[in-house]
Image: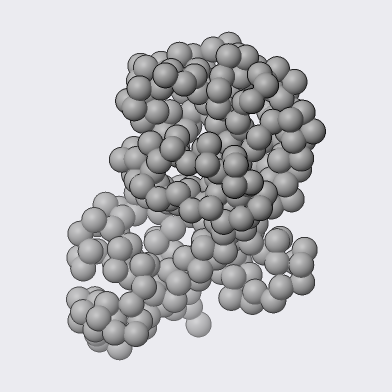
Amino acid sequence: MATIGFIGLGNMGAPMAANLVKSGEHVLGFDVVPALGQASGQDGVQIVANARGTVENADVVISMLPAGEHVLSVWNDIAPHARQGTLFIDCSTIDVTSARKAHALAAARGIATLDAPVSGGVGGAKAATLTFMVGGSQEAFARGKPLLERMGKRVVHCGEAGNGQVAKICNNMILGAAMIAVSEAFVLGEKLGLSHQALFDVASASSGQCWSLTSYCPVPGPVPTSPANNGYKPGFAAALMLKDLKLAREAAASVNAKTALGAHAADIYGEFAQQGHSAADFSAIINLVREQSKRG
């Protein structure tokens, strides 16, 4: 049995840590919000007093935190206390620059590292069906893959340090823009008298087919499991989509990549958030498209 440190026991981290416990690992957990720690304690995670407490006897330390600044702060705090041979895995979705800085600060102390952001949302975290996009050395990946497979169903090595984050923001830039396009198509169909089901039946079997349509259809009915059938309860919240689209836009600017559709998608989700809908599923963006279609 390995000892796993887990820092960040929120909506994603808590079920991920619980799945490690179910797989037979000894998990030392910490979150700055005491109630979250208490909840994970009920799932078998041994809650410790601070972040350093997760690392002192750990073989692997996993972090799942909100932003790059938090990852860098926590890794700076815990790295001096890591045992020789400890592997650090960051599963947060953060900016590429911060991810590579985190790798470097750990490497300076001889700590092996992976960045391994996830796709699959809270449902995937609970069901252990996440996809991990992993950056880091082949050696570190070989060590981390078996552990990641206990929390997900697909683990993809994307290359060097930081490339997991690159893959994540590129994927979600596609997803965000695609959901807006699907939503615009349904609203256009509505206004021209086409039923939701008819459009779905055509597009899902034609060249318009995409995940945003067939798995996460933004209108109730055609895909019973989509959030549209549950009041747009996330799922994957619009706030998180906006975060990822902003990260993609910032990364594009840093290398002078032209991502006009991705940048415009960020603006659209930004307006949605400003209207107070950050907590809704990102597929609820169709409601903004409808509202805009009534103007003028």
Image position of 273 with respect to 45: above or below: below
Q: Tell how many labels.
A: 0
Q: Nearer the viewer, residue 117 or 280?
A: 117
Question: Which percent across, then down, holds residue 148?
Answer: 45, 39
At x 31%, y 55%, the residue is 227
Image quarter of residue 287: bottom left
Q: Is residue 271 in sight in this rendering? A: no
Position in image of residue 248 (x %, y %): 64, 61
> Residue 226 appears in which quarter of the rendering?
bottom left
* Quadrant holding the N terminus: top left
Residue 292 image offset from top left, x and y in percent = 48, 74
Q: Residue at x 57, y 27 (%)?
A: 61
Residue found at x 33% / y 77%? 209
Q: Is residue 69 left or right of residue 170?
A: right
Task: Judge whether 56 appears above or below 89 on screen.
Answer: above
- Where is residue 293, by image quadrant? bottom left
